[in-house]
Image (cartoon, grey):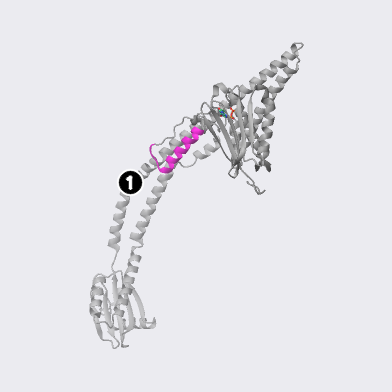
Amino acid sequence: MGITKRKQNRRRMPLRWQIICYFVTFVFVLMLVLWLSQTVFVDRFYQRVRMNELDRASDTIVSALDSDSLAAITENIAASKQICVLLYDGNGNILLSYDIAPDCIIHRASPETISGYYRQALDAGGKAVTRITRDSFRTVDADGKQLGSPPDATIVLTRIAENADGEVRVLFLNTVIAPLAATVRTLKMQILMISVVLVPLAFLLAVLMARNVSRPIDKLNRSSQALAKGQYEADFSVSSGCREVVELSDTLSHAASEISKADRMQKELIANISHDLRTPLTLIKGYGEVMRDIPGEMSAENMQVIIDETERLSSLVTDLVDVSRMSAGVPILNLSAFDLGDAVRETVNRYQKLIENDAYQMTCSCTDRLPVSADYVRILQVVYNLINNAINYTGEDKRIAVRAFRNGDAARFEVSDTGNGIPEDQLPLIWDRYYKVDRVHQRAAVGSGLGLSIVKNILNLHHAKFGVESVVGSGSTFWFELPLRDDGSEAL
Ligand code: ADP
């Protein structure tokens, strides 16, 4: 990371403080909501509740107008909801009356006031609500009666209805909004006390929580910085933390071990390559000097040594270029239809000429008609690499068997040698880049450790099946299968 970027990041708030801020803000908002709802808005809320109660009570009484238990129902409502009730018939006679509150105004108001409520209801279509506030309340009492301690407000609901016989009934309900000032004062005190206890407690909790969450992340951050500096043994284990943090720790540990492996292999490759480059270069230089300095050494054999060594160098460079090209991105396959048997036969023929002097015995059994659709050049590269390995690693008898045949709906290629084989635990590793089973003995004799990695890449690109069967002490068989194209259509 660049220094400026790191400086910019430093300006950001650390996770610990962010958590504390969120938590404290949350508690603050919570207390504010509590404060507003319990003190500022409690009055309005209480009035709404009383209003609804009045409404429901009037519905219940009106729907019970014809019931025998009208009196009982009304009395029950009046007592349980603290609502005063007056029910008149159409002639102004009182049918029911419950005066349960000393502040009730319908029982104390003048007949004019009552008929005023009635007219209001009549004008409004049968139902009216009158809210009388504390100040206007005193003036309501036309008789000049002392009404005790005046309430904050009182609500009168007037409703005109008819019973089943079509007789008019006028219902007056009155409920008192009790003064809440004392209650609100108590609540304020309570909330203040709760805040005094809760805010420091919330802060403490936030600090503890933030420490718990941020500590493992801090550690992972420090270890990652160490890893970035090349300390692959950096410790990513965390003892506490949530699932995501533990997963992150596992991922980073895995990444560290992979990076360290890749780094080790890279170093080995450089060591191997430089060794492999130096050997032919030394020979070329040596032979060149001998031919320049010693008369009569300018022979065709010496020239051939130089040419052979140059070829070795060029094949090494080709391998390296192939690997880097393939790991740089997904190469595009150049698909064409060809016969795998013919391709294998051709490659083996080319080899026969090369190895006949060294007493190798290479047998080739290829069945006819193995049409496949694949990248010809790359598949030949695979065949070449596998046969090359078989030559390099085969046993004392120097025998190699190459086969190409039909296996179900696939064309199968196999190459077997009689060498030392590969131990079972190494089998999955040989396809890795730069991997060599026996680093000490084979290096000088054979290639760069890139061959099988190239093979694997090419076959994966073709979605081909491939593998190796090996018995330690008796040899290995490398194989791959490509889908056969029987009906002339593209098989891939
Ligand atoms: P190299 O260039 O070293 O042969 P490869 O990628 O082709 O690299 O092979 C990787 C390793 O797999 C080899 O170093 C060797 O140890 C092992 N290997 C490959 N082919 C054979 C084989 N036919 N028999 C035994 N070991 C083999």
Q: Is residue 388 above or below residue 368?
A: above
Q: Quadrant of ligand 1?
A: top right
Q: Classify mark 1: residues with Cα within 10 Å, few (<14), some (14-19) or many (20+).
A: few
Seen from the viewer's position, the closer of residues 164 and 9 is 164
Question: In the rendered image, which residue does mark 1 sit on?
Answer: 201
Would you say 402 lies left or right of 232 here? Answer: right
Residue 333, quarter of picture: top right
**Circle 1: residue type:** Leu
Would you say 70 lies left or right of 203 here? Answer: left
Q: Is mark 1 within 8 Å of ligand 1?
A: no
* Region in magenta: 239-258
Q: Residue at x 75, y 18 (%)?
A: 300
Residue 213 shows in this picture: yes
Q: Residue at x 54, y 38 (%)?
A: 5
Seen from the viewer's position, the closer of residues 154 and 240 is 240
Would you say 321 lies left or right of 160 here? Answer: right
Magenta stretch, main secondary structure class: helix
Quadrant assignment for the N terminus: top right
Indicate the secondary structure of the residue bearing disc 1: helix
Q: Is residue 35 above or below residue 95?
A: above
Where is residue 56 drawn, in percent x and y?
Answer: 32, 74
Residue 353, quarter of picture: top right
Q: Is residue 365 magenta?
A: no
Q: Is residue 183 above or below residue 429?
A: below
Q: Is residue 335 above or below residue 184?
A: above
Where is residue 372 drawn, in percent x and y?
Answer: 65, 43
